[in-house]
Structure formats: structure tokens, C-alpha cells
Image (spheres, rainbow, N blue to C red):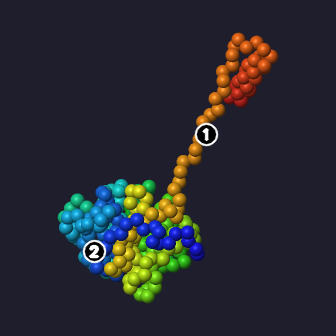
């Protein structure tokens, strides 16, 4: 597959990860990037432009570790994907210290990346690595609604318009790849991450308010902000041409041309009334 742009062409900014895990994740809430701790159950706020840490670390009551996160704008709370064999997604209260559990729902086996839908409440898209598919989960009750089968084991996921951006679960020595797929799971685009020892560990992703994609790289690699509009194209509203201006008829024009023009207007009005009143 030949792409017009390389991965490097899409990069707007990048800043280093703070999480110590082989892979990681994160989300944006209230103007900050919240990074999943990887090997810990803590998170923290990062400046979106510089990556500067704002405030201290934020503890949570998760008993294991924190793999990925997604902000639920409809409930002003944080969905998280814990690791360590805890086969649940947790919704955390961001106003408490530490962040405490509001509720938990089942997750797919080895589920990793999560992404709360931006348009529909109680909808979360989840990466099911074990079955190589994206799962649509109803966060109100934990039920699974639909599945998108993929030709690779998916790790991170974000829904952008009608399509999905994904990273794949890979092994040491493999190259990290970013995919764009449609709702049928067909690969539309793919981009190779920059080389590195842990490039195979690329993880979760999210969107900023401008529609840019933030992707968390593997261990010792950056968090990238990508201009994906270069790939998807910007949707511009159709241009509506101005209505042609018809000069008004001159009632004093008694020439044959003037009379015929006024008769044509009257006939058109009569035909319109016939249609309107079914005459």
C-alpha cells in the first residue's frame, strides 16, 4: 500500500512519555492530556503542546495497573482499562482524591484500548486483541452491541467520523503500525512508526478538539500529535450559488414582449396553485 504521506509528514508535535510500561495510552479531558501510567495505577495531567506535567500524580483506587483511558464527556468521568488480569473496565470519579470507582463493566478478554464515542452517550469502542476486532460496548450495562473484524490484533482504537484508527499488538522486533480502517474492517491507510527498540509497543490514542490524533508510542518513545486531516481530507460545506436576479416586470411596458412576459408569470403561478391544491 503506497501512501501519499509518511508518518513523519503527519507529526505536528511530540513529547516524551512518563509511563514506564512497554505500551501505554491516554485521553484528553478539560484541555489536558491524561496519560495512563502503564506499570502503575496512577495518572497525571500533561500540557497538550509541551507535555509539561501540570500538578502532581493522580492516584486511583485501581488495584492493578492502568493501560488506557477515555474521557466520558457525557458523565464528566473517566473510563479506564486496567491491566493485571482485571477483566473489567472501570468508570472513575475525577472529583475525588484518589479517583474512585463509580462502577465496573465486563471487558473483552485481553481488551486494551478504549475510546468513548464523541456523539453518542453510553457508547465506547474497545480493542479486543484476542479476537482481532473492535467491540462496541454499551457502558450503561456492559452489553456488547456490534463487532468489527480486523485482519490484525488491535491494541489502540479511536473512532473518527465513519472510520477507525488503530494500532496493532506486535512482538519485539516488529515495526509499529498505525492503521485507518472502515466500518467493515477494510484497511484504508497504514503508516509505519519511526524505528526504535520498542516501536512495537505503540498503544492507545485519542482526539483533540481540532480533530488531531494523539498516539502513545512504545516504551521510551514519544506521544505523537498527528494531523490526520491530511489523510482523511477536510469536509467543506457545499457552496450554494446565489439565486439569479430577475428584473421586475415593468407594468407600463405594453409592448408584445412585455405583455407576454407578464402572461408567463401568471401562467406559472396558476400551475403552481394547481399542484399545491391538487386541482
Q: In the rendered view, does 26 fall on the left or right side of 163? A: left
Can residue 127 be seen by looking at this rendering?
no
* Disc 1 versus disc 2: nearer the observer: 1
Q: Name the quadrant of the N terminus.
A: bottom right
Residue 18 circle label: 2
Q: Vertically, is 169 above or below 147? A: below
- Horizontal side, residue 157 vs residue 249: left or right: left
Element type at mark 1: loop
On the question of residue 171 being in view, the answer is yes
Query: Foreground: 4 or 170?
Result: 4
Which numbered tag is attached to residue 241? 1
Determine which quarter of the picture holds residue 58.
bottom left
Q: Give the left or right position of residue 251, taking residue 54 as reference.
A: right
Label 1 or label 2, whichever comes before in sequence order: 2
In the image, what residue occupies the spot 24% across and 72% down? 42
Name the element at disc 2: loop
Q: Nearer the viewer, residue 52 or 278?
A: 52
Amino acid at each position: 500500500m503506497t501512501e501519499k504521506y509518511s508518518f513523519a509528514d503527519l507529526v505536528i508535535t511530540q513529547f516524551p512519555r512518563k509511563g514506564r510500561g512497554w505500551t501505554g495510552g491516554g485521553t484528553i479531558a478539560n484541555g489536558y492530556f491524561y496519560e495512563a501510567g502503564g506499570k502503575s495505577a496512577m495518572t497525571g495531567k500533561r500540557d497538550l503542546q509541551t507535555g509539561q506535567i501540570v500538578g502532581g500524580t493522580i492516584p486511583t483506587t485501581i488495584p492493578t495497573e492502568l493501560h488506557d483511558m477515555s474521557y466520558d464527556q457525557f458523565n464528566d468521568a473517566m473510563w479506564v482499562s486496567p491491566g493485571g488480569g482485571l477483566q473489567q473496565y472501570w468508570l472513575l470519579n475525577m472529583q475525588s482524591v484518589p479517583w474512585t470507582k463509580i462502577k465496573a463493566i465486563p471487558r473483552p478478554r485481553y481488551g486494551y484500548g478504549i475510546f468513548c464515542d464523541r456523539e453518542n452517550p453510553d457508547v465506547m469502542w474497545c480493542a479486543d486483541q484476542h479476537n482481532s476486532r473492535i467491540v462496541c460496548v454499551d457502558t450503561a450495562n456492559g452489553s456488547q452491541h456490534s463487532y468489527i473484524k480486523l485482519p490484525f490484533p488491535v491494541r489502540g482504537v479511536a473512532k473518527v467520523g465513519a472510520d477507525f484508527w488503530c494500532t496493532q499488538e506486535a512482538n519485539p522486533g516488529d515495526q509499529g503500525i498505525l492503521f485507518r480502517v472502515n466500518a467493515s474492517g477494510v484497511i484504508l491507510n497504514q503508516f509505519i512508526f519511526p524505528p526504535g527498540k520498542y516501536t512495537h509497543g505503540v498503544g492507545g490514542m485519542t482526539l483533540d478538539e481540532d480533530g488531531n490524533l494523539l498516539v502513545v508510542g512504545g516504551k521510551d518513545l514519544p506521544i505523537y500529535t498527528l494531523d490526520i486531516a491530511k489523510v482523511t481530507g477536510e469536509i467543506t460545506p457545499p457552496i450554494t450559488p446565489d439565486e439569479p436576479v430577475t428584473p421586475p416586470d415593468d407594468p407600463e411596458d405594453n409592448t408584445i414582449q412585455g405583455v407576454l412576459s407578464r402572461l408567463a408569470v401568471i401562467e406559472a403561478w396558476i400551475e403552481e396553485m394547481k399542484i399545491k391544491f391538487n386541482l
